[in-house]
Image: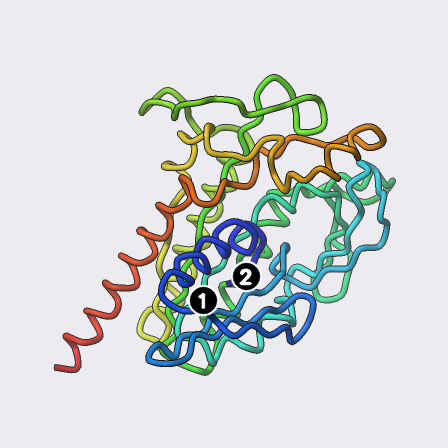
């Protein structure tokens, strides 16, 4: 898997599901690459890559104009931590969105083409929409053009943040105790744009992969999760007594981006399992 939300919430969920039947052997080829191998009769390996922008990135200012850092993003260069491994994959899950809110300098072909919220004179603000679109395009192209053959690529759509009563750093919180009803909550703003462009880039990649060895699948979790504002950890993410003590000295923000595990995100297991089972049945039918 690539990207950030899969790595943090969904990745944990997959591993917890696996732990019900077997204990994996864990290794860390690097700080951005974790390998979980299930041996015995399973012979199943999960590779977890930390590549929140999907493409090569560099932190150039830890503070930046919005106090969330300033990054260099090379929008046509898939991150080296994951891209070279694609030919060896049976399945690759790609996801990214939330990190693109961070201010960034945008490069293509080694040349500065613009930025997102860099607030620098004579640098065009291309917006985070452009950055996410081009990074998604580069990642999907890397998968489609891989020479391994047989990989099934799954693009998981944007996972909505659900702050109410303020923004994430302005007392926003998520304290609902029940899901929204159908039609009660709709996708809006940047997240609607993110979802739209992800679907567009997926369709383009699917056309490019047509007739080749790569199978493209869209895992559209957005509509289901927009109704689950009750399923975020809020102030309980990573709770410890030390964290309670730290509140006297640091601002601890509520987490309405990640998901409680176990919880609503378990539905993603069901969706992914169904999609992969469909692929397996199709392949078996074709060879029998």
In the rendered image, residue 165, in percent from the top left (x then y), is placed at 61, 17
Residue 47 versus residue 41 in the image, above or below: above
Q: Is residue 270 left or right of residue 263?
A: left
Q: Residue at x 31, y 25 (%)?
A: 182
Q: Is residue 5 left or right of residue 285?
A: right
Residue with the most extreme left position: 288
In the rendered image, residue 135, in percent from the top left (x then y), is placed at 59, 56
Indicate the quadrant containing the C terminus: top left, top right, bottom left or bottom right.
bottom left
> Residue 221 appears in which quarter of the rendering?
top left
The mark found on residue 92 in the picture is 1
In the rendered image, residue 4, in percent from the top left (x then y), is placed at 58, 53
Q: How far is the residue under mark 1 from the one under mark 2? A: 8 Å
The mark found on residue 129 in the picture is none
Q: Residue at x 45, y 70 (%)?
A: 144
Q: Is residue 208 left or right of residue 161?
A: left
Give the residue number, with chain letter if any, for mark 2.
Answer: 2
Name the N-terminal-most of marks 1 and 2. Answer: 2
Residue 17 versus residue 229 in the image, above or below: below
Q: Are marks 1 and 2 in contact (CB under 8 Å)?
A: yes
**Which element is circle 2 on?**
loop
In the rendered image, residue 203, in percent from the top left (x then y), is placed at 39, 55
Q: Nearer the viewer, residue 188 or 232?
A: 232
Residue 226 versus residue 44 in the image, above or below: above
Residue with the most extreme front position: 241
Q: Residue at x 66, y 25 (%)?
A: 167
């Amino acid at each position: 898997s690539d990207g950030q939300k899969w790595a943090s919430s969904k990745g944990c969920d997959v591993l917890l599901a696996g732990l019900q039947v077997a204990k994996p052997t864990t290794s860390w080829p690097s700080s951005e690459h974790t390998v979980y191998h299930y041996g015995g009769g399973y012979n199943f390996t999960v590779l977890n890559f930390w590549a929140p922008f999907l493409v090569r990135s560099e932190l150039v200012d830890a503070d930046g104009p919005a106090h969330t850092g300033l990054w260099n993003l090379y929008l046509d260069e898939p991150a080296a931590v994951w891209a070279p491994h694609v030919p060896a994959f049976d399945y690759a899950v790609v996801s990214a969105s939330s990190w693109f809110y961070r201010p960034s300098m945008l490069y293509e072909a080694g040349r500065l083409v613009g930025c997102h919220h860099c607030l620098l004179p004579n640098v065009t603000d291309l917006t985070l929409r452009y950055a996410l679109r081009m990074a998604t395009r580069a990642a999907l192209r890397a998968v489609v053009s891989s020479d391994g053959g047989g990989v099934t690529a799954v693009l998981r759509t944007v996972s909505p943040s659900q702050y109410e009563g303020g923004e994430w750093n302005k007392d926003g919180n998520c304290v609902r105790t029940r899901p929204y009803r159908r039609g009660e909550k709709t996708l809006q703003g940047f997240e609607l744009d993110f979802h739209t462009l992800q679907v567009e880039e997926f369709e383009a990649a699917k056309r490019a992969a047509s007739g080749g060895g790569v199978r493209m699948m869209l895992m559209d979790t957005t509509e289901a999760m927009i109704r689950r504002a009750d399923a975020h950890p809020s102030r309980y993410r990573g709770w410890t007594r030390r964290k309670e003590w730290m509140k006297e000295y640091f601002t601890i923000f509520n987490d309405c981006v990640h998901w409680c595990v176990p919880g609503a995100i378990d539905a993603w297991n069901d969706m992914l399992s169904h999609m992969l089972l469909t692929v397996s049945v199709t392949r078996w039918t074709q060879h029998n």
